Every structure is written in structure tokens, then in C-alpha cells.
Amino acid sequence: MTDPITNWTPSGSSAVASDRPSLEQLAETERRQVLARLLDESREIRGTSLWSDAWRRLRRRRTAMVSLAGLIVLIILAVLTPLLPLQSPIDKDLQNRRLLPPEWSSVTMGSREGLGFADRSLVAELRRFDAEIDDLRRRLADTSDASARKDLENKIRQRTEIEHPFNQLWNRLGPVSWTMCRMRIAVFGDYAIPSLFGTDKLGRDLLARVFWGARVSLVVGVVATLVSLVIGVTYGATAGYLGGTVDAVMMRIVDILYSIPFIFVVIFLITFLGEDTVKAWLQARGIEQITIFYFVIGAIYWLTMSRVVRGQVLSLRNEQFIEAARTIGASPARIVFRHLVPNVLGVVIVYLTLTIPAVMLFEAFLSFLGLGVAPPDVSWGQLLNDGVEALSSVKLFWWVVIFPGAALAATLFALNFLGDGVRDALDPKLKNRD
Amino acid sequence: MRHLLGYAIRRFGWMLLTLWIVYTVSFVLMRSVPGNPFSSERTVPPAIERQLRARYNLDAPPIRQYFDYAIGIVTRGDLGWCLRLEDYSVNQVLAEGFPVSASLAIFGLVFAIALGIPAGVISAVRRGSLADLSMMTAAVLGIAVPNFVLASIVILLFVFMLPLFPAAGWGTLAQIVLPAFCLGAPVAAYIARLTRAGMLEVLSREHVRTAYAKGLSNRAVILKHVLPGAMLPVVSYLGPATAGVLTGSLVLEKIFAIPGMGSHFINAALQRDYTLAMGMVLTYTVLLFLMNSIVDISYAVIDPRVKLQ
């Protein structure tokens, strides 16, 4: 078979022996044909990149693919939670709905008497509330007196920010979630899914709490992992690229940190962060406790990542493309982040998929101990904590434990399977090593 | 033997360095909390507060406190007084809690090894069989299900539905079974997977083929020639396993109301009992360091190719 690529001699160089005439000797039309043929053939050649190869390998593992699909569904549901016709995750009903077993009778939003909603319905209450605000606005437009205007403005702000019916049913909705809740009311009205998972000891719907808890748990998993990614990759790549004494010192620090039992230090740290004065200090600076929580978790999971990245960078730093970059005057930072880091991405992703379940488990663990996400925020670990507390009573309240536990276990299960699959797909050398 | 001693001495040096770092960080955090541990309580007369502060050595300048406390720990092994538990020194709490936690951890580890290794061996020898498949699925489940979830399920099943075991407490053998099972289950799952992978690797080696060719029985080959080699990854996993068991005992002691170190530590953290929490962190650091060193040394003893660094 004559290969046009190897036989084709560019721009008149006749040094390569060829039984075909070179391009210049051909007539214009023939030349076009040759080039067109070449183009067609090159179109058919598909380079296999590392990613498409890995994807192909991953697709062959049914467990990993099922896990991936399950996780995608979970993420979509978690994102769309405010749109789903769920009951309120925080509205307590101590009189009538404490520890109800799973049931099928649907619930009207805002029907609890204690809420004091108009017609005992959220839609009616919203209509009444909006009318009231409109009325206030109209009065605001009519008055010209400065102090009266100010009073009215304050009243409107207070009413919309604090006394809005949404604030009684949901906890601190962000602007996006707020809009989504509005849309949900527009679509489903007062309908809410029955308490399929039962209710907890304060009469809150467990299904809604599991859904809202998924949001917190997933966000913790992702954010903390990203924090660990940034720290670990930067640290490891810098140590590996600089090498020598710097590397030795940086890696010694990692060794020391490795031998510190971090879980205990973190618990100690959270003790400190929970102190009222520290809390007040942080709040004055607009830092939420949960943000620190993300960072603390992320900050302890970077060690393995930094070691792995450093090892990879060490083996890459003497490659020619790095030397080439250095020759044309690229700065060390540029070399590290533009040339080295993309090349270690495969390993990084492998560790990323294995870190996310570890971080989620850690969050659940801390929340379970009462040291993590604080109420009224919900997370799966906290739901389990409530569940275990309810367990130690006389009657069998199995649903308070089984449903959050199953949600957490299934998610971790899927993440572990996906992590294993990704590792085998991206890094066949690591196969069979645990 | 000489380099073993040298290794032990070096490890000890690293441990002291680590302890010093943990101590310093904890101390700085403890002392940077504004006010003092008593300011949040109901107001006491100034004279009494002065006495309290003198009692806990809080009236000295911070740097003095730092050294006094450190010297107290090093020379007298005195970790100070609890701030929240009445009439208890940190040492007393440790002395009461440590035996409980240690026996729970040992039961958990023994259980994990007794369950994990046979499961791994069987699934490697009968590779691809139903037993292999079901045991490895169970192992993945064991890794994925957090032990506090497992604990609640186990309580539901074996305490409330089939009243076989007591729900909580400490002292009798029946009370240890459930917490030790929950503590050991994730570790057992890891050990089973490691054993299986190790066994499969060793089974394909030449010396195993030679052993079979000599006409040794299947049992002798597996037990004498394959299993020891396959144990190496398991031994090196015992360090992290100890860490896992210690962490796990934090939650399990809480769930099963066991009066061990873990439950004290959690209470100390929740009630902001700084001296107790600090004492606990230091103790856990020492424990983990010792366990890791023992694992490293035993690894070198089992496998002569491994050099201690």
C-alpha cells in the first residue's frame, strides 16, 4: 500500500526517492485530486486521546456507568429541589405530625394552623401578602413626606425580608432558589408530595429534609475537594518543579502533617470556631461558619494529592517540552501551571474521584457528632444523628434512620464505584492496587 | 538489630516534633479565644474569678503558661484539670477512658482480621465463584456504608426487632459484640479486598507452581506458601486501620453510650473543655504514632527486603 503521507515530498525537495512525480510536476487538476485525497484520508484518521481512550474503557465497566448515571440523577434532583413539590423541610408540627410512619395521603402547603396562613393555604397567603405589599407600595408612591416615606420603606423591607411566608417554610433561600420556589408554587400550587419517608421527631417531613440535605452534603463534598485540589496541586507541583532543598523541606512538612491525627485536630479546631466570641468575630466579617467548615475539611485532604502530583512532576520536569518552554523564556509559574499541571491531570482526577466520597463521609461524620453543619441547615449526617437519637425509644421508628442512611450509603457506594472505575480507566498501572 | 534501634530512636524524635507542633497549635488556639474559660459562666465575684484564674494558672503571661503547661506534661505527665468536668483531672479521665477504648479497638481489630482474611482467602482461591462475588460485593458495601449508619441498622435489627443484644452500656461481653462488629466491619472489608488481591498475585508466582509440582496438598500450598506473601499489604494497612478504628470509636462510643475516651473527647469538644480536648489530641497522636511505628517495624521483620528509613 502506498502511503501518501510518507511518499509525499513537500515543496520541491527531491531528496526523498519517490516513484511518483512530485507535486510540482503534476498538472493543476491532478494536484488538486491528490491533495483532496490526502485530506479525505486524514479526516478518517482519528487520534485516540488519553481522554477518549479512558472514556472507552470506563464505558465498558457497567458498575461504573450505572454509578455515574445514578450520580447525575442525584445531582440534577439536588439542583432542582426547590422546584419539586416537596413539603417544608423546617416547618415543625409538634401536635399532629411527630414521627409519623411513611404515608400516602398528600399534604396542602401551609395547612398547619400554627402558621396562621390565610385559608390555611400557601397560595392564598402569598396572594394576601403580595396584595399587602402592593398596598404599602401604593401608599409609598402617594406620600411625599420624607419621614413617612422612610417609615414605609422600612416597613416594606422588613415585611419582604423577614415576614415573607417563604421564610417560615424554607431556611434562608438564595435568590435562585427563591425564584425556583416561586415557579414551583405557580406550577403545583398548594400540592405537596406525601410524607413518603415519614416525619421526624419534630414533625418535619423527612423526604424534603433528605432532598435539602443532599444539597448541603454534595456541596460540601465538591467544594472541600476543590479546596484540597487547589492546595495539593499547587504545593506538589511547586515542590516537584523546584526540586532540591525546597522539595526536601516541603515534603518533610507533608510527612510531619501526615503523622498528625487530623480528625482530632479538626474537632479541636471546630470547638474553637464554635466559641461565641469567635463566631461573632467571624460574622462581623461576613464569613459564615459553613464556609470555614468547607475549607477546614479541604485543608486536611490535600496531603495525598500533593505527594502524587509531586511524584508525577518530578518525572516530567526533565522532559523536552519543559526544556523547550524554559528556553523560550517561560516563567516558572507559567511552566508549572500551563505545562506541568495539565500533564498530571489524569492522576489528579483519579484522586479527585476518590477524595469526594471520603470528604462527604467526613462531613457526615462531623455532622453526626454535632460538630458539623449546624441547624437549621440540614445535612445527611445530621439527619442520621436525629435518627439515632429517635431510635433509642420504645417504639420502632425505623424510617428516621433507614432513609437518610440509605441515601448516604448509596451515594458513597456510587462514588466509590465510579472512583474505582475512573482509576482503572485513566491509570491502568494502578490497577489491582488498593 | 542495630538499625532497628536507630530507627526507633529516629521515629521517637519525629514523634516529639509532631507532638510539639500539635501542642503549640492547640495551645495557641486555646489561648486566642477571647476572655477566659470562666467568663461565659454565670458571673462570679472578681475575687473568686481571680482565685479561679490562679488555680488554672491563667494569670501568668501566655508564654509562661505555654512553658509551665509543657513542663508539667513532660516532667509530671500532668495534663492539667478539666475545665468542665467537676473534680476531674485530664489524667483521671484518660485513665478511666483509655482501657475501655483500647479494649473496644482491640475487639474491633481482631474481629476485622478474623473476618477479613478468611473471606479474602476463600474468594481468591474460589475466584469467580458465587462465594467470591457475594463476598466482594459485601466488601464494597462494607467500605461504602459509614459505620454509624451500620450501627443504627444493627441496633434496629438486633436490639429492637430481635432482642438479642442490649442497646447500650459497657462491661459485659454481650455489650461489646455490636460496637465491635460495627467498628470492625469497614476494616474487615478493606482487609478482605487486600488479602484477595495479594493472594491472586502470589498465586501466579513460580514458587507456588513449584510447590504444587512437588505434590503438596492444596491446603499446604495456600497456607504455607501463598498466605504469608499475601499478608504484606494487609500488615501495611494495619496502621491506617488503627486510625480508622480510633476515629470510628468516636461515633460508636457515642451511639452505644460507652464511657471511653472517644465520648469524653466529643463532649470536651462540644462543651469547649480545652484542657481535656488538648490532652485527648496529644494522646491520640501518640497512639497513632506508636501504632504506625510498630507496623513499620513488623513489616520489615516479615519482609527482609524492606529497609527501614
Image (cartoon, coloured by chain):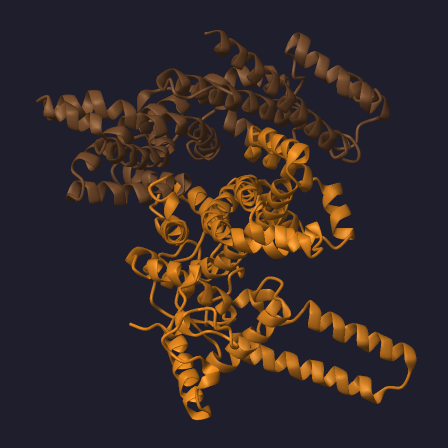
> In x, y percent, where is residue A270?
63, 39
Q: Looking at the picture, does residue B38 appear above or below residue B102?
A: below
> In x, y percent, where is residue A129?
64, 78
Q: Nearer the viewer, residue A16 or B286?
A: A16
Left or right: where does residue A247 sit relative to residue A263? right
The colour one sees for chain B in the rendered image is brown
**Residue drawn where x is 41% and y is 32% of the image:** B256
Left or right: where does residue A163 sit relative to residue B266? right
Q: Is residue A387 visible?
A: yes
Q: Quadrant of the N terminus of chain A?
A: bottom left
Q: Looking at the picture, does residue B287 appear above or below residue A295?
A: above
> In x, y percent, where is residue A257?
60, 32
Chain ID, orange in image: A
Q: Quadrant of the C terminus of chain A?
A: top left
Q: Quadrant of residue B160?
A: top left
**Residue drawn where x is 55% and y is 74% of the image:** A180
Left or right: where does residue A139 sit relative to residue B130? right
**Residue drawn where x is 64% and y is 44% of the image:** A238
> In x, y percent, where is residue B94?
55, 18
